Image (spheres, rainbow, N blue to C red):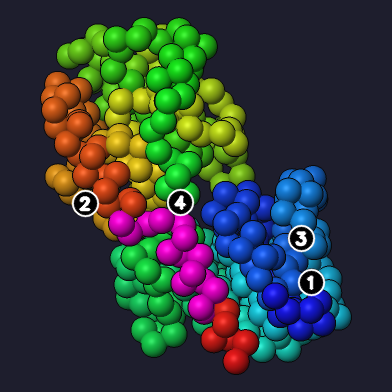
Amino acid sequence: MGNRKDKIKICLLSSISITLRNFYGPLIRKLIDSDYEVTLVSSDFDNLNKLKEDLNCKIYSTPISRRVSPFRDIISICRLSLFLHKQKFKIVHAHTPKGGFIGMISSRLAFIPNRIYTIHGLVLETARGIKKKLLWFSEWLSCKLATQVLAVSPSLRQRVIDEGICSEEKIQVLGYGSACGINIDKFTRNENYSVMRSSIRSDYNIHEDAIVIGFLGRIVPDKGIETLVLAFKGLQKLDKRCYLLLVGNFETVRDCLDGETIQEINNNPQIICNGEFVSDVLPFYAAMDINVLPSRREGFGLTLIEASALELPVISTKITGCVDAVEDNVTGLLVDVDDVEQLSDAMLKLVNDSELRCTLGKNGRQRARDLFDSRRLVTSHISLYQNCSI
């Protein structure tokens, strides 16, 4: 390990610190243990400060609005560019659309030599009109100002190229995709798995012999929640054992569910929604028999890999990112976007076939272990940074 003066200064930046904590925790720890001086930049100070305590790294909090807000964005760029210039970072690595936009402009103004932007997904895929044009320009500018661009899946990389956002030569995928993989040791069934399963089911009054179809993520239209609720209502009529477990927060920053869907979630006794973000997802996965992500847009679909690592069969949509996370008919089932009937049929197929659920789950575990172990992705990131430091 080098002396402090020899350490390479790197800044990891995101509009919200959850992205850094959930996706890049293992990488940050490895960097701190190596020849890097790590600073995390985000807008939510309280969560950022917790990261500082947990990881023993430096932090800098600056407002980064997730909404289109030119005045606030200019202030953020001015503040951040001054900070980056003063600190003289060797590398700035930005995440999330707004984090990338603010981060790449600021680091370019601060003359940072190595500017990396990771695209985690394209919000513009489900946008329309002037909003889509603004989102396209934002992504294009972030990629233009970056010295290197990463995509979290092969299909996302291709979509970015097809949209004319970034050139084929400039954008790459590390390994087989995902942000930074998953902790395979953590997402493994152990002696506590059945205890966690029983505990969550007891907490939410779910029968032990019920078949639980679970979703984990933001409760928003882009995640296909409206389609999922309708498909589950159809499934309910055919099999009374089924429960739908929704784990996540109702987000209102970009969009919210329609009133009919919210009413069904609140009034259907076999739809359980915890309504909030959870830091410990393992007990909720343990309560599930099937994991579903019927999303309209994704960058990769990390929850699908987490569920697969825990030997859960998965169902998702034939969209960017999810087609890389799920091997159709091998680790799970893929259906068309917003197709209620297909989704209901796929759920019914797995509900009625416990042997198929077991086979898909075991295949998923093997694939997650072989391709998406975080140790593999941490090594790939550090190799990328080392090449920047030469």
Amino acid type shown at disc 1: Leu
Residue ID at (66%, 79%): 91
> Which residue is painted at 67% across and 65% down in the image?
33
Residue 330 against residue 278 in the figure, above or below? below
User: Which SS class for mark 1?
Assistant: helix
The residue pinned by badge 1 equals 80
Is 285 placed above or below 107 here?
above
Report if residue 372 lies within the magenta region: yes
Residue 256 location in percent, x, y? Answer: 52, 37
- From the image, which quarter does the C terminus lie in? bottom right
Disc 2 vs disc 1: Cβ atoms closer than 8 Å?
Answer: no
Q: Earlier in the sequence, mark 3 or mark 1?
A: 3
Q: Which residue is mark 4?
A: 182
- Few, some or many residues within 10 Å of mark 1 (<14, 14–19, 20+): many
**Distance from Cα at disc 4 to Cα at disc 1:** 30 Å
Mark 4 or mark 1: whose residue is earlier in sequence? 1
Numbered badge on residue 327: 2
- The kind of residue tagged 2 is Glu
Q: Is residue 139 visible?
A: no
Residue 57's disc is: 3
Q: Secondary structure at mark 2?
A: loop
Q: Position of residue 68 (x, y in %)?
A: 65, 60
Q: Residue at x 59, y 29 (%)?
A: 276
Look at discs 2 and 3 and give the one toward the viewer.
3
Q: How many marks?
A: 4
